[in-house]
Amino acid sequence: MTVTAADFGYVSTLVRQRSAIVLEPGKEYLVEARLLPVARAAGLGSVGDLVAQVRRAPAAALAERVVEAMTTNETSWFRDVHPFALLTDHLLPALAVSRATERRIRVWSAASSTGQEAYSIAMLLSDWLRGRPGWSATILGTDLSQEVVDKARAGRYSQLEVNRGLPAPMLVRHFVRSGTEWQVGDGLRRMVEFRTLNLAAPFPALPSFDVVFCRNVLIYFDTATRRQVLDRIVRTMRPDGALLLGAAETTMSLGTSLERVQVDRASYHRTASSGRTTP
């Protein structure tokens, strides 16, 4: 059954109010696909029944499950490849020099979904740290959805999930077989902390980061929200820190203090006041 215009409008408003994500007209099919399993899990016959239930109790947990279902995005290991090559080939060598005294690196995966991006970063940092005694690295992974944060924290993935972009040598080196699933090794899990965080709301207290990955999430926000999110992210970055966005995302026309730096086939953003080409 197709989602009615009234139900789509209600869901769109609810999602925008609680996450700032914009569902444009034409996404009715996505609402149907994402919410029908939620309806069935709640013992309801249709998305229409689900929306009616949420209308009656918008403060209940079911409304939160609706928002989480609509804000769960696509993810994979080492997604798009080039940003991770940029990290290992350009950003980390620069940080090896600029952080030589403190010998600590902090990275934020700001839209980490079920954890693949954060653990991908952890694998690269783990390998990089092997030849650097006395250095440490931590990764913070955040997402709006408690459900996906819980999955990320558990670090257990199906064979199908690990097949999506994870090189076999890294699977063998960093994962342990657990029944029909793969468990992220303890070494990586100690490097990564996962928390819920709504990018569209004021941030809680956060440490200062050397590198921030905020990829493929700004495209779901309107212009004003993008500007606000970027301004808040900049305040979490070290003065010479680097921000990596998705390939389709830009800071142009947003009036931020960020400038784009192209490196081979990838790019990152830095604060214009840093005045450098390396982080």
Image (cartoon, helix red, strand yellow):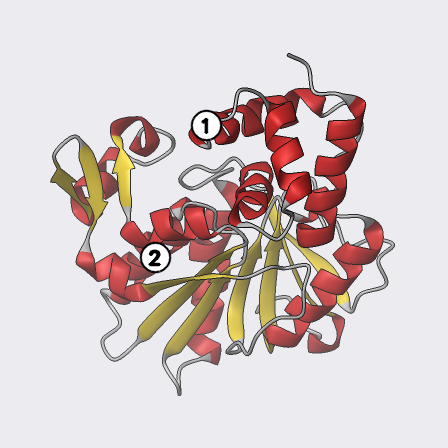
Mark 1 = which residue? 43
Residue 221 vertical position relative to residue 40 in the rendered view, above or below: below
Asked whether, in this view, residue 190 is left or right of residue 261, the answer is left
Query: Earlier along the polypeptide chain: callout 1 or callout 2?
Result: 1
Quarter of the image where the N terminus is located: top right
Q: Position of residue 7 (x, y in %)?
A: 73, 29
User: In front: mark 1 or mark 2?
Assistant: 1
Under mark 1, the amino acid is Gly
Q: Quadrant of residue 212?
A: bottom right
Mark 2 = which residue? 122
Under mark 2, the amino acid is Ala
Residue reaching furthest to the front = 56
Q: Position of residue 43 (x, y in %)?
A: 45, 27
Q: Quadrant of residue 105?
A: bottom left
Question: Residue at 30% of width from left, 33% of height from top?
Answer: 162
Question: Residue at 18% of width from left, 46% of height from top?
Answer: 173
Secondary structure of the residue carrying tag 1 is loop
